[in-house]
């Protein structure tokens, strides 16, 4: 079953809600986002970059790291009562207006962007 963003936010809230500690502070959440982004960057570098994984490093997948980043993002949004679907729609509207002529459209040229 596909989950909507609202469903994911509710699921994370139910999970966090079972613990006395609750959500971390915004500052701690920012640190967690940074940590998870670093882990994602490390995996991308191992997979697509020039830095091979050490034999002692466990195998992680980019999908898992993106999932971790999404989870922390949802926690952050929930802790501040932010509706991520609404946030996403606002960003897409911005791209549709402010950035509508920024990139070369596929039907206008040979490449998607340079």
Image: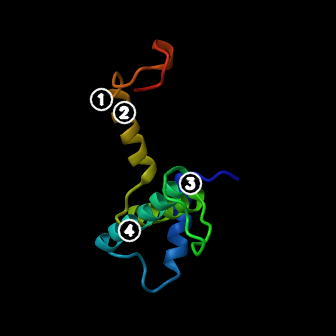
As measured in the structure, the alpha-carbon distance from the residue carrying label 2 to the one carrying label 3 is 30 Å
For mark 4, what is the residue? 79
The image position of residue 107, as x and y in percent, is 50, 14
Q: Mark 1 falls on what kind of element?
A: loop
For mark 3, what is the residue? 47
Instruction: Report the mark closest to the observer, 4 or 3.
Output: 3
Q: Quadrant of the C terminus?
A: top left
For mark 1, what is the residue? 98
Q: Which of the marked residues, 1 or 3, is nearer the chain's N terminus?
A: 3
In the displayed structure, does residue 37 sit left or right of residue 57? Answer: left
Q: Mark 3 falls on what kind of element?
A: helix
For mark 2, what is the residue? 95
As measured in the structure, the alpha-carbon distance from the residue carrying label 4 to the one carrying label 3 is 33 Å
As measured in the structure, the alpha-carbon distance from the residue carrying label 1 to the one carrying label 3 is 34 Å
The image position of residue 37, as x and y in percent, is 42, 61
In the displayed structure, does residue 112 sit left or right of residue 97? Answer: right
Residue 20 sits in which quadrant? bottom left
Instruction: Report the mark closest to the observer, 1 or 3.
Output: 3
Name the one closer to the observer, 49 or 6. 49
Name the one closer to the observer, 57 or 97. 57
């Amino acid at each position: 079953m596909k989950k909507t963003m609202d469903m994911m936010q509710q699921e994370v809230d139910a999970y966090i809600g079972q613990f006395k500690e609750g959500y971390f502070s915004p500052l701690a959440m920012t640190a967690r986002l940074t940590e998870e982004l670093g882990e994602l960057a490390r995996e991308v570098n191992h997979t697509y970059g020039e830095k091979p994984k050490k034999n002692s490093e466990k195998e992680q997948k980019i999908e898992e790291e993106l999932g971790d980043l999404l989870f922390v993002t949802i926690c952050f949004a929930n802790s501040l009562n932010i509706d991520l679907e609404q946030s996403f729609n606002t960003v897409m509207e911005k791209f549709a207006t402010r950035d509508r002529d920024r990139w070369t459209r596929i039907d206008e040229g040979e490449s998607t962007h340079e």
